[in-house]
Every structure is written in C-alpha cells, then in structure tokens.
Image (spheres, grey):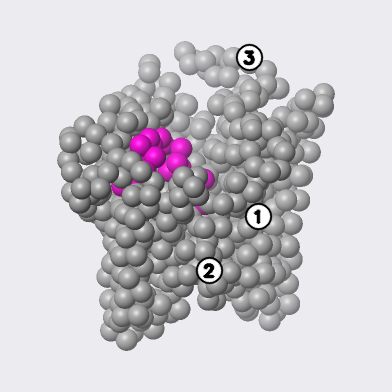
C-alpha cells in the first residue's frame, strides 16, 4: 500500500511539473528544456529553509515558489524579447548553470552528495511522515494547480497564450503585448515548479543534483508529449504513465548499470515516436 | 607566463569550438532549425573513433571512418526524421522536440553500450611537444589549430566557389524560391546535414583526448558553439569562427580568477549580456 501511495505522490508532484511544462511548451509554444533546473531551485530553496533555518513548511514553499518565479522571469525576459530560438539557448544555459551550482556550491547545496534529513512537514496538525497524510497534501496542491491551470487556460490570458503560439505577429498587430504574455506564462510555470520542488524535497527527505539535470528536463518534456499538450488530462496521464514505466522496465532482466540509460533511452524513443505519429499525445490536442 | 599559456590554450580550444560552431552555423543558417541532436552526432563521433582505434586501425583511418559514419547519421536524420515531419507541416516546435528525443536516444544508447562513466581516449597523434619560443605546444594543439583553419577555409571555399555551395546559399536565403527554380532544396538540405555532421567528428575526438569520453557532455559544447553563432548574428561563418575563438579565450582567461567548474557561468553571463545589449549579434545591423 505504501509503495502504491508513494507512486501516486511522485506522480502527483510530476503532474504539477508537467502542468507547468505544458503551459510553456504546449500552450505558449516556448521550447523550454530548463524545467528540471527550476524545479531544482524550488526543491533546494524549500529544503534549505526548512532544514537549516527552521522556517515553517508553508512559508518555505511559498518562498520557493517566489524564488522560482523570479528566476524564470529574470532569465526568460532578455531572450524572449528577441526570438524563440534564442530562448532555446537560454534554457539550455540555465539548465547547465543550475546543475553546476547544485554540484559545486557545496557549502549551501551539499554538492553532489546532496541534502539529507529534510524534515517531513507538519500541516494543520497532521504529521506528513505517513504517506497517507502526505498524499492528501500533494493531492490538494495538485488540485489547486489544476484549478489555476484551468482558469488560466479558459481566461483571456489563456487565449492570448494560445494566440501567441499560433501567430506572434498577428497578436502584436492586434495590440496585445506578446512579451508580457510570455513572461507571465513563465512566471506561472515557475510558481508551479517551486511548489513541486518543495513537495519533492519534503517527501523524499533527500535531494541531490541528479534529479534536476538535463535528463530530468527531457523526462518532463516526454511526460507532456506522451500525455498530450494543451489539456489538463494530458499532464496527469503523462506522469502517471512515465513514473510507472521504470517499474515495468524492472521486469525485463537488464543489468543495473545500464538500467538508467535504458530508461532514458525509452523516453527519447517515446519523444520521437509521438512526434512522428501522434504529436498530440494520448489525450492532448494538436501541437 | 600563465596569461600567455591560457591565451594559447584559449586560441587552440577556440579552433576546436570554432569547427563545431561552423558546422552548426552551416546547418542552422540553411534550415533555421535548432538541430539539438547535433550534440549527439558530436558525441558519437569520438566514441566511434575510439572503437575503430580499439580495432587496431591507424588514427587517420579511424577518424575518416568515424566522420563518414557521422555524415551518414546526419543525412539519415534529415531524410527519415525531419523531412517527413516538415512535409506533414509539423510546427518547428514539434521538429525540435523530435530532435531532443533523438539526442536522448543517441546519448543513452552510447551510455548503455559503452558505459555512463568516463573512458580514456588514447591520443593517436602522440604526446610530443614542440617549443614555440618559450611556450611548449603539443601535437594535439597543432592539430586543433590546423583543423580549425582547414574547416574554415573549406566551408568558405565551398560556399563561394562550388555549385553545391551556391545552392546551399540559395536555399538558405529562400527555400521556396529555390524549390521553384528546381534547385532541389531537399537534397541540398541533406548535404548540409551530411557536411555539418562530418565536420564534428575530429573536434569531438580532440576534446575526448583531453577530457576523456563522456556520453552526456555534447550539449555543453553545442551550447558554447551556438552562443558564438548567435553573437555573430546568425549565419556568418567568419563571425562564428572568430567569436568562438574569442569566447574560448575569455573562458580560459576567466580561469585566472574563477575555478574551472564555473566556466559555464561565465559563458552564460556573456550570453545574457549580449542579449541585453546587442540582441542581433555583434556584427549585424539592426533588423
């Protein structure tokens, strides 16, 4: 039962991340491969605040969300001003820079051995060390994020983002502010990532740089692509499927040293196959 | 002395980086597609050369064979992945995600077949040292210099004096018109990918000889190369090549004040700086 619950909790945390990636990649059409890095910034911020500074979890997770919003907006602003391809370079850059910071700023992040002993939060008197309690908290967070995502998608703001994806020039010609739309999307995505990061650290009570590297970003893009873009269901189906996939792969007898690369290889194959044959994903719309 | 040493290292590294930047500029300026999988082709090149050397082949033969394999992979990527997608009117985002998937496939296949750990690459060009005044220069460095200059002269000559080069320039400036004039942009584009992929095999081996073979490092070099390309205003071979050298010199000189693991930070800082003040490149006029 605990095994199943922890699968659900992880899938819910990744669903939060998939929603944010979906918002950027699927809805707005910005190719971002630094989502795992921003997720990492959230995880480290929240974990450091709760372990070394004894900040209550609620405050720490809000701080993590705020930091992620600032990071996403600050780095996105200059490149989004120019053109889409510049943002590709920026997002690769953020990804590598954040990995370098997580690995090398040993005094704060614990270097490549990571941070251990992150306390499980106590929320409204509930001790969330129990997966049964934690799942309530992560479900609540996902539910709130889903409501935000739904409202954002069906508001004028969401229509603006969809229009930006289809034709930037037309949006600008219609008197809308393209840059502001993109930056707001990046900010909202950052907030989701920050919350997901805080939950991730608190649930596993351990984080290291390797959960937030380039491969992690590829995983997030795969989740969105497999689940399907521009729908909420897609961002929930994708993580459920891809978090479960390693358990399925465990049935195949492969040596443990190549298990990691083989898992990542599967994500790559899924990306290519879905782009070739079903760019909308399982339950998504046309990308 | 340290300054001179770092300066020379910078110029040499710049020639290696410049060759990668040239190949990427060739591809990007013709197709306007951010070919992320190029990093995979780059990584594969060194592993193939390593394999051929292991089979007992002499160094130059191994490099030629490796380069031909890279060439085939590049051409096949265009023929079997990008062309079908573009014919189906897939958005650039879809093509880019497919490219990212291909990168994940190549990198992880390498990690699964060889090993995810660092492998030592034996330098077949020997470890002899030439004294240039008071500064010792290794054969590898001489080879890098020669390779960079040759690649530059080759591409300039190709673009200026050959029929294929003229076709490439035609497709780059307007693919639609090129199609009307029966210049066969599809075949031209395949050649562009083939030549671009051919060029990255030797730089990849040179880098591997210095830092060892690593399956996941390709993107870092592609990032540096694309920053040089953007700084030159997209699409100028001369600009991309010499800015690569400048970038590598700056990275090397930064070692005087910062430890090596932060050089990605230096690069990214330069990129953001560029975005803020000269977003269309150092040499381009405002568009």
Q: Which residue is mark 3?
A: B128
| Magenta stretch in the rendered image | A198-219
Mark pair 3, 2: CA separation = 56 Å
Mark 1 Cα shell of 10 Å, populated few (<14), some (14-19), many (≥20): some
**Label 1 close to label 3 by CB (< 8 Å):** no
Circle 3 — which element?
loop
Where's the N terminus of chain B, which quadrant?
Answer: top left
Q: Nearer the viewer, residue B137 or A219?
A: A219
- Above or below, comparing residue A276 to residue B206 in the picture: below
Work out whether residue B165 can be spotted: no
Circle 1 — which element?
helix
Q: Is residue A187 left or right of residue B152?
A: left
Q: Residue at x 82, y 26 (%)?
A: B55
Task: Residue A151: give x, y in percent of width and height.
Answer: 31, 75
Front of the two marks 1 and 2: 2
Circle 2 — which element?
loop
Work out whether residue A109 can be spotted: yes
Mark 2 Cα shell of 10 Å, populated few (<14), some (14-19), many (≥20): many
Q: Is residue A214 left or right of residue B187?
A: left
- Callout 2: residue from which chain? A
Do marks 3 and 2 both belong to one polypeptide chain?
no
Q: Residue at x 37, y 53 (%)?
A: A135
Q: Which residue is mark 1?
A: A269
């Amino acid at each position: 039962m605990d095994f199943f619950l922890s699968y659900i909790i992880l899938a819910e945390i990744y669903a939060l991340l998939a929603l944010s990636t979906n918002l950027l990649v699927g809805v707005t059409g910005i190719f971002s491969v630094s989502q795992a890095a921003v997720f990492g910034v959230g995880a480290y911020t929240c974990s450091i605040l709760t372990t070394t500074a004894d900040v209550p979890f609620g405050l720490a997770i809000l701080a993590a969300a705020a930091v992620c919003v600032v990071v996403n907006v600050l780095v996105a602003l200059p490149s989004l001003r120019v053109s889409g391809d510049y943002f590709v370079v920026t997002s690769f850059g953020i990804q590598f820079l954040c990995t370098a910071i997580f690995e090398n700023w040993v005094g704060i992040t614990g270097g490549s051995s990571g941070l251990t002993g992150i306390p499980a939060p106590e929320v409204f008197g509930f001790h969330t060390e129990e997966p049964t309690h934690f799942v309530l908290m992560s479900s609540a967070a996902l539910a709130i994020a889903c409501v935000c995502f739904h409202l954002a998608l069906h508001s004028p703001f969401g229509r603006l983002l969809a229009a930006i994806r289809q034709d930037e020039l037309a949006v600008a010609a219609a008197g809308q502010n393209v840059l502001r739309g993109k930056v707001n999307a990046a900010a909202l995505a950052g907030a989701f990532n920050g919350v997901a990061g805080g939950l991730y650290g608190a649930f596993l009570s351990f984080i290291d740089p390797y959960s937030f590297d380039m491969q992690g970003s590829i995983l997030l893009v795969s989740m969105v692509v497999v689940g399907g873009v521009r729908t909420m269901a897609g961002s929930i189906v994708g993580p459920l499927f891809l978090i479960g996939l390693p358990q399925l792969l465990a049935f195949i007898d492969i040596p443990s040293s190549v298990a990691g690369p083989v898992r990542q290889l599967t994500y790559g194959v899924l990306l290519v196959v879905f782009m070739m044959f079903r760019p909308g994903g399982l339950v998504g719309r046309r990308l | 002395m340290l300054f001179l040493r770092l300066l020379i290292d910078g110029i040499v590294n710049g020639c290696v980086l410049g060759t990668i930047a040239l190949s990427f500029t060739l591809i990007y300026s013709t197709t306007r597609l951010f070919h992320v999988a190029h990093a995979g082709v780059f990584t594969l090149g060194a592993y193939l050369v390593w394999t051929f050397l292991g089979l007992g082949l002499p160094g130059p033969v191994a490099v030629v064979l490796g380069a031909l394999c890279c060439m085939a992979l590049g051409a096949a990527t265009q023929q079997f992945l990008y062309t079908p997608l573009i014919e189906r009117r897939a958005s650039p985002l879809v093509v880019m995600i497919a490219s990212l998937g291909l990168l994940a496939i190549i990198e992880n296949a390498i990690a699964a077949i060889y090993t995810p750990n660092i492998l030592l690459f034996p330098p077949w060009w020997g470890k002899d040292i030439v004294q240039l005044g008071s500064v010792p220069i290794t054969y590898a460095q001489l080879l890098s210099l020669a390779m960079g200059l040759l690649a530059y002269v080759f591409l300039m000559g190709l673009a200026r004096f050959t029929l294929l080069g003229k076709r490439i320039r035609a497709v780059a400036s307007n693919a639609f018109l090129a199609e009307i004039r029966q210049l066969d942009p599809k075949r031209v584009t395949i050649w562009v990918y083939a030549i671009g992929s051919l060029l990255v095999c030797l730089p990849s081996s040179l880098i591997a000889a210095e830092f060892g073979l690593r399956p996941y490092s390709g993107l870092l070099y592609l990032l540096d190369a694309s920053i040089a390309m953007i700084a030159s205003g997209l699409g100028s071979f001369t600009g991309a090549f010499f800015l690569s050298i400048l970038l590598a010199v700056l990275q090397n000189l930064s070692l005087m004040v910062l430890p090596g693991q932060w050089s990605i930070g230096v690069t990214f800082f330069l990129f953001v700086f560029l975005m803020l003040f000269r977003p269309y490149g150092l040499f381009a006029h405002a568009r």
